Amino acid sequence: MGCNNSRQGETHNPNTNTQKPRLQKKPEFQNGCKSLLSKYLTDDVFQQLNGVSDKFGYSLAELINSGVVNQNSSIGVYAGSPDSYSTFAPLLNQIIQEYHGYDPADLHKSDWDVSKCNFEPLDDKYCMSTRIRFARNLADFPLGTKITKEQRRQVESLAKEAFQKFEGELLGTYHSLANMDKQTQKQLIEEHYLFKEGDKYLEAAGLNRDWPDGRGIFINHSKTFLIWVNEEDQFRVISMQKGGDIKAVFGRLSNAHTIINKVAKFAYNDHLGAISTCPTNIGTGLRASIHVKLPLLSKDMETFEKIAEKNHVQIRGIHGEHSESEGGIFDISNKRRIGFSEVELVHDMFNGVKEMIEKEKELEKHAIQS
Ligand code: ADP
Ligand code: DAR
């Protein structure tokens, strides 16, 4: 059961809203499915929303397809446009409330003031590299789930125009994925700069349509500032460097945010903050992560996970989402995205990694003494 996950053979034109596809019945979810979609797509919500489409013609069927096709999803939905968040509010508000602890009446806040980062660099012995990114989508287009090939090319063209405004250390070059040789693509992925391809969750959400057309990556000359174009979101703006100097990485990103916000009109509102394709990335759209080496602490996952939960951080593998740890190195990043400012979320990550390193040092002493 599940919609056509590549959505080929769609009979309605996304730009004419001529057909609002209705599902014959509410999708079934396997026992053990833990997605927030399966929890909140009740019979009542399904009856309310079946046959409804947002102003770009994005339907309930499209909104939920990824979570119906991939029953191991944690969330299971992707928005089709900023309008999706109001059109499908009976479902999305509940998912947002549970994931973010954020209510429909709450107002988002933003603060990029680097001077408020009152912490020193973390120990490079443990911190392999620091990466901070934010997600953005343009205000006047549907999201990648519903965008047409021509619109996606317009987004890429507008992005390339914006990149011309960068100066100093942000100066760099845009590399179209469609024109990139496979060896270069493989190397950039292995070096943690470029996004992977073929993600099944994105595929079922229609985000991989026309791949690789309209996709690419901007890279500055020192490879410390990158922008992904038209992957899961239309912009993923990334600052990264070796070591644990979080303040330097955040300062570079804050500078880029100021510049790009002057030349691009992003989808944003007082309640949801920045609009993202996945509801997990609304608000700041910011994920601040450190690849940190914790060979001893990671042998005690209960303690490791307790420190993570206390500091509102997530433990991930080192090749992006759904990947594994290697060599005792883990990706530690803020879990929260909305209702807290960029400065506050960078502090979440700092506090989590700092406590993890302190615990690792304690275990090192015990190991020496025993
Ligand atoms: P995103 O937050 O943009 O979704 P992913 O988790 O998908 O990022 O990872 C994208 C790429 O960025 C992967 O190659 C991953 O290894 C790399 N990456 C994430 N955090 C770091 C980090 N702190 N240092 C180096 N590379 C990182
Ligand atoms: N894999 C999807 C999305 C989870 C959040 N990660 C994003 N958006 N990259 C799921 O529902 O599990």
Image: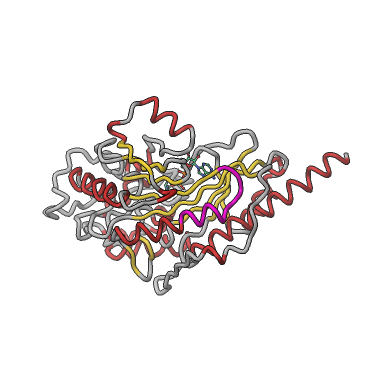
Nearest to the observer: residue 132 or residue 18: 132
Q: Which residues are magenta?
A: 242-253
Left or right of 12 on screen, residue 125: right
Left or right of 263 on screen, residue 131: right
Residue at the spot x=40%, y=41% of the render? 219
Most distant residue in the front direction: 168
Magenta run includes residue 62 = no
Residue at the spot x=56%, y=66% of the render? 116
Question: Which scheme is used to colour this image of the protein?
Answer: secondary structure
Nearest to the observer: residue 83 or residue 27: 83
Most distant residue in the bottom direction: 105
Give the main secondary structure, helix, strand or loop, of the magenta stretch. Answer: helix
Please tell me in which quadrant of the rendered image residue 220 appears.
Answer: top left
Quarter of the figure with the N terminus: top left
Can residue 51 be seen? Answer: yes
Residue at the spot x=58%, y=60% of the render? 347
Nearest to the observer: residue 241 or residue 82: 241
Percent of width and height locating residue 186: 42, 29
Can residue 26 be seen? Answer: no
Percent of width and height locating residue 127: 63, 44
Percent of width and height locating residue 143: 28, 52
Q: Is residue 93 above or below residue 171?
A: below
Percent of width and height locating residue 178: 28, 33
